[in-house]
Image (cartoon, grey):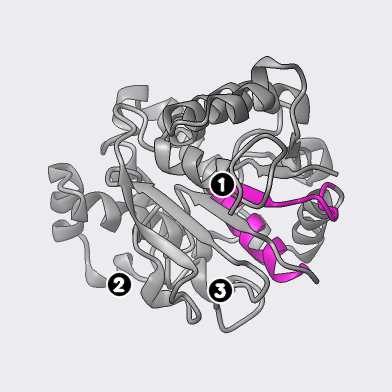
């Protein structure tokens, strides 16, 4: 059980809860410190093991748990639609290559019936993937597509991931923070709560990918989780995964709960979890969630 439950995103299957906590907690403490709460920051990191724990579910995607290769796509139609949404997001963000690719593709390839290969060929050439080189970028993209589509379509994987989050939630839990695919996992976990949750934080979230993710979240229709008292959503303008930085129009019940107007700058790594965590809006929200001995109270 933990006061703060952390939920990671894609491509973490070779790590563990411990290694991810070692990456995330200094960054989260830094964000809290930047926001002006040094004592809360010290409790999170410098004073020894804090009250935040990582809900690790990366191993459910490990190759040994699945038939075939970890780089094979199980649902090519859904994966192609997701890739096309990312390409469209890059074009909206001003990527000239993405704009050219979209302009040169038949309209059908931008929709749900898109073929995977043409869209992948386009994605590997746009920011932020191009700097990795074509071969590595394609492996990264395919793995990302595979894990997102598996979570959305495989009930066994979905329930295993949800169980990892639920195992850390107790009466003391005040905050759930989810990054990337983990924001979808965290959002759905918040819907399952039977008591109030002071704060939900989503970072670099694909919840706004309407035709791919949004319409496959549970429960349907999407809405602000009933027991969540405050929901803070942050996105970098260049983060392809965070297709819609402002989620308020998509989630009924957002008035007074969902704060989704924040836009941050993560520099050369727009989707990096630890860069999101260092930002003052995250730190301020976490530091003031619920009541903490010696710290601020809401």
Q: Is residue 95 visible?
A: yes
First of labels 1, 2 by sequence position? 2
Judging by the rendered image, the residue that carries numbered circle 3 is: 224
Q: Label 3 crowding class (10 Å Cα cut-off): few <14, some 14-19, many 20+?
A: many
Q: Quadrant of the N terminus?
A: top right
First of labels 3, 1 by sequence position? 3
Structural distance between the alpha carbons of marks 1 and 2: 47 Å
Judging by the rendered image, the residue that carries numbered circle 2 is: 108
Residue shown at the point (27%, 46%) measured from the top left: 237
Q: Position of residue 187 (x, y in %)?
A: 62, 62
Residue shown at the point (39%, 60%) measured from the top left: 260
Q: Is residue 146 visible?
A: no
First of labels 3, 2 by sequence position? 2
Structural distance between the alpha carbons of marks 3 and 2: 32 Å
Q: Position of residue 59 (x, y in %)?
A: 78, 38
Could you say which is closer to the camera, residue 58 or residue 145?
58
Residue shown at the point (68%, 25%) measured from the top left: 43
Left or right for 51, reference 111: right
Structural distance between the alpha carbons of marks 3 and 1: 20 Å
Q: Which is closer to the viewer, label 3 or label 2?
A: 3
Residue shown at the point (66%, 15%) measured from the top left: 46
Q: Which is closer to the viewer, label 3 or label 1?
A: 1
Helix, strand or loop at mark 2: helix
Could you say which is closer to the camera, residue 260 or residue 12?
260
Looking at the rendering, the stretch of residues picked out in magenta corresponds to 168-193
Judging by the rendered image, the residue that carries numbered circle 1 is: 288
Left or right for 194, reference 268: right
**Relative to 251, residue 149 above or below:** above
């Amino acid at each position: 059980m933990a006061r703060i439950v952390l939920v990671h995103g894609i491509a973490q299957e070779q790590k563990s809860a411990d290694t991810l906590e070692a990456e995330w907690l200094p960054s989260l403490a830094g964000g809290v410190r930047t926001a002006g709460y040094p004592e809360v920051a010290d409790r999170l990191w410098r004073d020894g093991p804090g009250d935040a724990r990582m809900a690790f579910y990366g191993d459910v995607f490990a190759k040994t748990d699945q038939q075939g290769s970890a780089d094979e796509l199980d649902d090519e139609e859904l994966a192609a639609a997701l890739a096309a949404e990312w390409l469209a997001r890059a074009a909206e963000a001003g990527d000239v290559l993405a704009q050219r690719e979209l302009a040169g593709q038949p309209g059908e390839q931008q929709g749900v019936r898109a073929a995977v290969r043409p869209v992948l060929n386009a994605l590997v050439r746009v920011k932020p993937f191009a700097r990795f080189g074509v071969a590595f970028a394609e492996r990264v993209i395919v793995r990302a597509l595979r894990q997102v589509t598996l979570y959305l379509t495989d009930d066994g994987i979905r329930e295993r991931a949800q169980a990892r989050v639920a195992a850390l939630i107790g009466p003391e839990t005040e905050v759930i923070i989810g990054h990337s695919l983990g924001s979808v996992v965290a959002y759905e976990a918040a819907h399952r709560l039977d008591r109030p949750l002071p704060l939900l934080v989503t970072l670099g979230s694909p919840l706004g990918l309407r035709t791919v993710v949004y319409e496959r979240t549970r429960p349907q229709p999407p809405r602000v989780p009933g027991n969540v008292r405050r929901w803070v959503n942050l996105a970098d303008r260049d983060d392809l995964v965070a297709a819609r930085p402002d989620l308020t129009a998509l989630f009924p019940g957002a008035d007074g709960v969902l704060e989704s107007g924040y836009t941050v700058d993560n520099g050369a790594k727009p989707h990096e979890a630890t860069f999101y965590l260092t930002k003052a809006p995250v730190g301020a929200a976490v530091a003031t969630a619920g009541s903490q001995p010696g710290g601020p109270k809401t």
